[in-house]
Amino acid sequence: MRTKSIVMTACATLVLFTSAFAQNFEFTPHVGGQINGGLDLTTSLFHRFEVANGINYGVSLGYLLGEHSEVEFLWNQNKADVRAQPFGGVSSIKLFTMTQNQYLGNFLFHFTPREDKLRPYLLAGLGAAALDPNVHGVSGTTRFVYAVGGGAKYNVSNHFGLRGQIKWSPTYITSTNAGYWCDPFWGGCWLVGNNHYLHELDITGGITFRFGGTPTVH
């Protein structure tokens, strides 16, 4: 709750600032559904962890650099149950409910000029994901996340629009030892790591508010 309050306060402040002093800003609250993957991590009790699907929501604040490019900050939150699969084919059990907050810096490329009503785009981003297990005495962790996706904007007027988006954002969790690899030609052996990611796919829709000096939409 504290994270959400900080993000909403910061975005509201930025919106007021940009509407008064800047141009070409877009502010978009969004909501949608998120599909989460699982992790093949072996412990003494379990061999796989699954994260349930759920609702996600957040906000983005973007700045139009020109006719086709844009940079934006995006915050996205999702809460989901985490279940573990024990050895021996026993039914999975719920461990905890995890809250995930994504903080991404994104670059958007639009296929049409910014004054067009319909603006399909591609997205790529980097950032961090704060994972909180919501278990007493267990602290959360922050991990690297990247994102790719795309969507479309529909400019209803100079200051109001609609936005739909699909985004894939793998979060790096940990690395485990996958053994050694030896070069048969040059000689020598190296320790090989196996990286584990929590894969997430979300589909969202939102209302966009545009501030300052935007061209006339036609």
Image (cartoon, grey):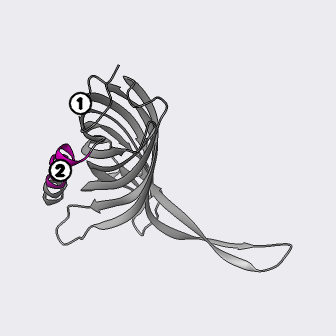
Say whether residue 172 is magenta: no
* Magenta-highlighted residues: 9-22
User: What residue is disc 1 on?
Assistant: 159
Residue at mark 2 to residue at mark 1: CA–CA distance: 16 Å
User: What residue is disc 2 on?
Assistant: 17
Q: Residue 20 appears in which quarter of the rendering?
A: top left
43 or 120, nearer to the observer = 120
101 or 71, nearer to the observer = 71
Three-letter amino acid code of the residue under disc 2:
Phe
Q: Residue 171 appears in which quarter of the rendering?
A: bottom left
Q: What element carries label 1?
A: loop
Percent coordinates x, y for residue 52 in the rendering: 32, 45
Identified at 33% across, 23% down, the residue is 217
Left or right, 92 with reference to 149 = left
Three-letter amino acid code of the residue under disc 1:
His
| Residue 48 visible at all | no
Q: Earlier in the sequence, mark 2 or mark 1?
A: 2
Q: Which residue lies furthest to the bottom in this view?
A: 188
Q: Main secondary structure of the magenta part?
A: helix
Identified at 41% across, 28% down, the residue is 119
